[in-house]
Structures are given as structure tokens and as C-alpha cells.
Amino acid sequence: MWLPDRLLAVRNRVLSSPGFQRWAAAFPFTRWLARRRSRELFDIVAGFVYSQVLFACVQLKLFEILAEGVQSSGHLADRLGLPPDEARRLLRAAASLRLAEARGRDRFALGELGAAMLGNPGIAAMVEHHAMAYADLQDPVALLRGEAERRELLKYWAYVGSERPASAAEHAVGGYTELMADSQRLIASDVLDAYSLEEHHCLLDVAGGDGTFLVTAAKRWPHLRVILFDLPAVAERARARFEREGLADRAIAVGGDVLRDPLPQGADVVSLVRVLHDHDDGMAQSFLEATCHALPEGGRLLVAEPMSGTPGAEPIGDAYFGFYLLAMGSGRPRPPVEVEQMLRDTCFDQVRQLPTRRPILTQVMVARRAG
Ligand SMILES: C[S@@+](CC[C@H](N)C(=O)[O-])C[C@H]1O[C@@H](n2cnc3c(N)ncnc32)[C@H](O)[C@@H]1O
């Protein structure tokens, strides 16, 4: 065995020995580390229960109620429609997770994380739709083996596994399009802070959802024309959005299927935001090839999505998106080096990864359309 592997095996043998664990928990210099390790492990063990506490808070609109001010648990029980003891149980659980905050013996206020939830309504929408993801993830081994029976997310994401996604009706795309729009608000500004469109004249957002990303870009750069391409029922929503935002003179929405229809011409920069990781390798490559045909030589491609192995956000890319996309039935988070290779294998060069404010939300890569 290679020396580092042998050392790793020794470390793991020591860490898993009950005698060592007892000693480390008692010894003053290792006690803090032992406590941190056991807390980290317990957080993983209990993660589902923590999520369900949050789910209950969101469903009962606890954060909105607490935002009105400090209240007694009895008063909160009435407002939440819960028996007093169970309201207290929920409030204490929420306080332990910093979603709420205990004030005195029996009064509660909004906690730090509850306040952050209120500021980002997209997170609450995500929490509510997780009911489907968790139903699908009930038997992860069956999912990994391709033997799972329940597939709620597959129905929710109407385009996944569909032969003719372009024929998806409005009611089939409405749910996921709204969910994406809610979370896109957080992402768009980080992406556009990482890459300025000042020097570009026309941005084509492929699979751009309801246009939230393009609206943010168009408002930031008043000279910029923007084109959205998505499935017809989704593009229709974007068209209405552009009109509502007063952008109809420089924003258009085109409906179609990236894999069958030509993309609109005329853009000098194309974006794929949270698109590649949604698709298995062959399909993701086809999306990239379509963008090659839409861009002139020297045009730029922006790829923005959470990626595998992001320092400080490893569990988001690899555990959360890895298993979410498994349950959805398509795609996988890729490390930047793989995304770069896919870009080079199509028509792109000068691939660069750009730093983003919150890599936990998205990574950004920019590449040049080669000749
Ligand atoms: C995960 S969402 C991302 C939406 C948006 N870019 C964002 O980040 O909010 C993926 C988008 O791809 C679109 N899409 C999926 N397959 C497509 C296809 N074959 N042609 C065109 N759009 C497609 C979906 O309708 C959806 O809007």
C-alpha cells in the first residue's frame, strides 16, 4: 500500500476505536476536537429531522409571524393552530437551530437564520418542494441501483426524460419555472458581478426560464439587447415578464427545443445558467454544440452553476446536487475541470473560471468561441 494510504488506514483505525474515542473526549487537549467531530457526525445523522423542523416552520409561516415581534408561546400556539405543548416543542426545536430565538422563559423571537429565510423567499419555496425530493430519496440505495419506484421529481421537471419536451403544456412547466425564478434572484447578481457585460451588445440566455436572469442583466446594462430561448410554454412566460418589466423593445423570448431547433442568431455572448448539470453527458454536450452554432468566432459563453468539489461547499455540490439530480433522473454536478474539458471538446478555448461572491450558490466559467 502507498504510504499516504497506509497512514490514512492507521488514522481511521484509531478514530474508530471506542477506547480512543473515550480517551479523546476526556483528554483536555483533544476534548474540543472530539466534541466537534461528534457534533458533525450527529448533524449528518439528524439532518432529515432538522429539515422537517424547518419544513414545519415554513408551512406554518412561523418566520413571518415572529417578524412581527417577540411573542409568548401561548399566543404563538393560537396563531400557529397548534396545541400549546406542541407549539413549545416546535419553538424550542427552531430556537436550537437558530431559526427562532428564546427570549426569557416562554417568549420567542425571530432567530438569525429565520431572518435570513425571510430575506430570501426562494429558500422557502425550495424547502416546500423538497417534500417531493425527500419522498424520492426515501430509498437511496434503490435509486442508486436504478430500482426506485416513486419518482415525484421526474414528474415535476416535465422535460426530464421527455421525447418531445417542447410540447409540455403551461401547467407542466409552471411549478418548476416559478421555483427557478425565486432562486435565480440570488444567483443572477453574483454571476453578473463575476462577469461584466459592458463590452457585449447582445446576450442569449439558453434555457433561461422566465427571464429573471436576463431582466437583471438588461437593467444593469441599458445598452444590452437580450434574447431568451426555452421551451415554448416557458418562453411565453418570459415574453409576458419582459413586457411587465418594460423591456419589450430590447428583450425577446423564443420558444423551441435546444436539441431540435436552431438557436436565435445575433448574440455575442451566450449564457447557460444551471443548465449543464441538469443533463447527462451526451445531452449536455449537445447543448454546448447548439451554443457553438449560435455564436460568432470570438463570442463568449458563460456557464454558471454549482459545481462538484467547490472548496467550502463540497456537500452542496456533491451530496445535495449529486443526490437531488439522481432523484430527478438526469444530470450530475461536474467539477470545473470536467466542465472545462467539455467546453474544449466542442468549440471553445480560453476557458477561465471566475471567482464568485458565493461559490456555494454558483461557480462561473467563461470561454471563447474558437475559429
Ligand atoms: C434548471 S432550469 C434553469 C432555468 C434558468 N436558467 C435558471 O437558472 O433559473 C432548466 C431550464 O431548461 C429548460 N429546458 C430543458 N430542456 C430544454 C430543451 N430541450 N430546450 C429548451 N429548454 C429546455 C427548462 O424549461 C428550464 O427552464
Image (spheres, helix red, strand yellow):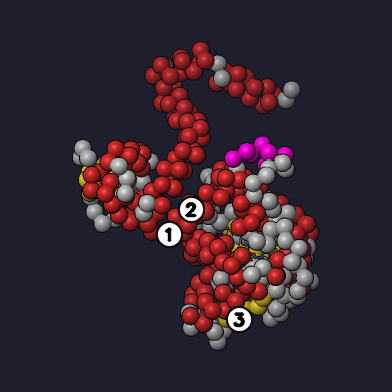
Q: Position of residue 343 (x, y in %)?
A: 73, 60
Does residue 249 lie above or below 48 as drawn?
below
Res 185 seen here: yes
Q: Decide: marks 3, 2 in contact (CB < 8 A)?
A: no
Does residue 249 lie above or below 229 as drawn?
below
Left/right of residue 99 with respect to residue 204 in the rendered view:
left
Q: Nearer the viewer, mark 3 or mark 2?
A: 2
- How many C-alpha atoms fall within 10 Å of the one at disc 1: few (<14), some, or many (≥20)? some
How far, Cα to Cα, is label 3 from label 1?
27 Å
Q: Could you tell me which secondary element the residue under label 1 belongs to?
A: helix
Q: Position of residue 58 (x, y in %)?
A: 41, 52
Q: Position of residue 119 (x, y in %)?
A: 38, 59
Residue 252 got which mark? 3
Q: Mark 1 — residue?
A: 121
Front-most of 337 and 18? 18
Left/right of residue 320 with respect to residue 351 in the rendered view:
left
How far, Cα to Cα, is label 1 from label 2?
11 Å
Q: Main secondary structure of the magenta part?
A: helix
The answer to which image quadrant residue 235 occupies is: bottom right
Q: Position of residue 218 (x, y in %)?
A: 53, 77
Magenta residue check for 306: no
- How many C-alpha atoms fall within 10 Å of the one at disc 2: few (<14), some, or many (≥20)? some
Q: Could you tell me which secondary element the residue under label 2 belongs to?
A: helix
Q: Mark 2 — residue?
A: 128
User: Which quarter shows the N terminus?
Assistant: top right
Q: Could you tell me which secondary element the residue under label 3 belongs to?
A: strand
Q: Please give the range of residues in magenta.
A: 138-145
Q: What is the three-letter code of the residue carrying label 3?
A: Ile
The answer to which image quadrant residue 311 occupies is: top right
